[in-house]
Amino acid sequence: MRMVYSKLANLKNTCCIMIAALTMIVLAGCTKSNYVDSVPANSKAVLSVNAMELIDENSPVKTIVLPFVNKDRKSLKGIDLTKDIYAFETVDGMLGLSIYVNDRNELLDFFQRLQTVGVMNEVAENDEEITAIASEHWLVNYVNNRLLVMGPVVNSATERDLMQERMRNMMAQTVEDGIRSSDMWTYLNNVDAPVKLIAQASALPDELVSAFTIGAPRGTDPSDVLLRAEVEYEDSVLMIEGDMFSYNPNIDQALKETAEVYQPITVKWEKMMADTLLAGIFMNVDGEKFVELLNRNKTLGSMLISTNRYDRIKGNKGDMAFLFSGKIAENNGEHDIHTSILNLPKGSEKDGERLVIAVNVENAAGAVAGTFLSWVNRVKKIVFTLKKPELKKEDGKDQQD
């Protein structure tokens, strides 16, 4: 009898282990984070947004989305607001959104309602997926709690079919194929902010690439320089605070050394950034050191030689501004941009930013179009500031690097 009990006990333990293992397998296969894997591992840029930020007081889309939000369920017409939303740019320049859905039927009903008012077209469903077209040029695909939006695509049935097939393949990706397998994902998760960004310099508007690669060794490919930042929105201004880095140790070291050249700005740069300007770059540098950095940059170095501004920059000992006037049309036609370089008297600011790159979006519509920045509506100005060096303790005191 003791042997029978012993066998029964062993059988019970074995069954428990099998049930536990099966439960883990099922849970792993159904994990909500799988929607993240739709984002390609080789993406040029990824923007992660805490979905609850969409209804935050400062959200640029609050008034649009709030009527559709179920606060008790923390959902927006089937979209789970407890999960991050990921915007991304693919290696070939396509833009995408990856979203987790917790109610398929509610999402479908919402799409059908949008179709009646002309916002969406060709809403279709079967047992496996929901497809639609939004605003003529954006394809929408839902499969197994994953919602993927991609575009823009030309108004061609062939192009749309090819993109839909590509989207289906992306939504079938596993962790080995998606962004979670990349170094970019690791760096993105190291940024502690509700809205965070990591992007190759090559994903930025062409007109800004040179500014963000200052100090990189001559001949550096912009895809080897990355921007890591946290993002906020307030009063029609998209504020991006971060730093530049590289997976390449030599490039990364050069970028770190460049960051040390910038000192706190003492002037109120906002007063100089008129709405009529295209862009402005503001800094506080020793001109001799800064010229060495500019000479590594083929585009900016050529500009200095062609405009005879070398001596003015080299002789600078403090605040300096590069002001760009003109307008880049939305059709990306020819544009005439004038550059002014100003050596500024010392101001009264005690702890200003060390580097500011500001862009008036309305004047730079053509530059922003076709980049990940074009996702952002209602933004009049984009302002990048170099992240201040973290405090470190030395001899019992907090000091800056």
Image (cartoon, rainbow, N blue to C red):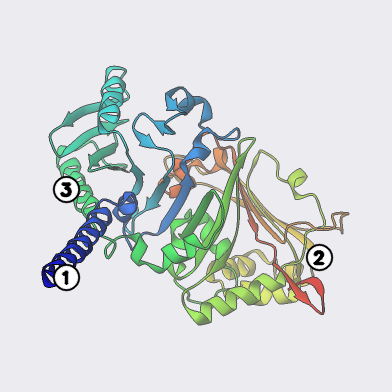
Instruction: Name the kind of residue labelled 3 in the image.
Output: Glu
Q: Residue at x 30, y 60 (%)?
A: 178
Q: CA distance from mark 2 to mark 1?
A: 84 Å
Q: Mark 3: give few (<14), some (14-19) or many (20+) Cα within 10 Å.
A: few
Query: Could you tell me how many numbered marks the image carries?
Result: 3
- Of the numbered discs 2 and 1, the one sitting upstream in the chain is 1
* Displayed quadrant of residue 347: bottom right
User: Is disc 2 placed on a helix, strand or loop?
Assistant: strand
> What mark, if any, has residue 306 been given in the picture?
none
User: Is disc 3 placed on a helix, strand or loop?
Assistant: helix
Q: Residue at x 86, y 58 (%)?
A: 345
Q: Position of residue 394 (x, y in %)?
A: 78, 78
> What mark, if any, has residue 318 been given in the picture?
2
The quarter of the image holding the N terminus is bottom left
The quarter of the image holding the C terminus is bottom right
In depth, the one of 366 and 235 nearer the eye is 235
- Of the numbered discs 1 and 3, the one sitting upstream in the chain is 1
Please say if 274 is above or below 222: above
Q: CA distance from mark 1 to mark 3?
A: 56 Å
Q: Position of residue 337 (x, y in %)?
A: 58, 50
In depth, the one of 287 and 341 nearer the eye is 287
User: Is disc 1 placed on a helix, strand or loop?
Assistant: helix
Q: Position of residue 216 (x, y in %)?
A: 55, 74
**Residue carrying label 3:** 165
In depth, the one of 393 and 283 nearer the eye is 393
**Residue carrying label 1:** 6
Instruction: Name the kind of residue labelled 2 in the image.
Output: Gly
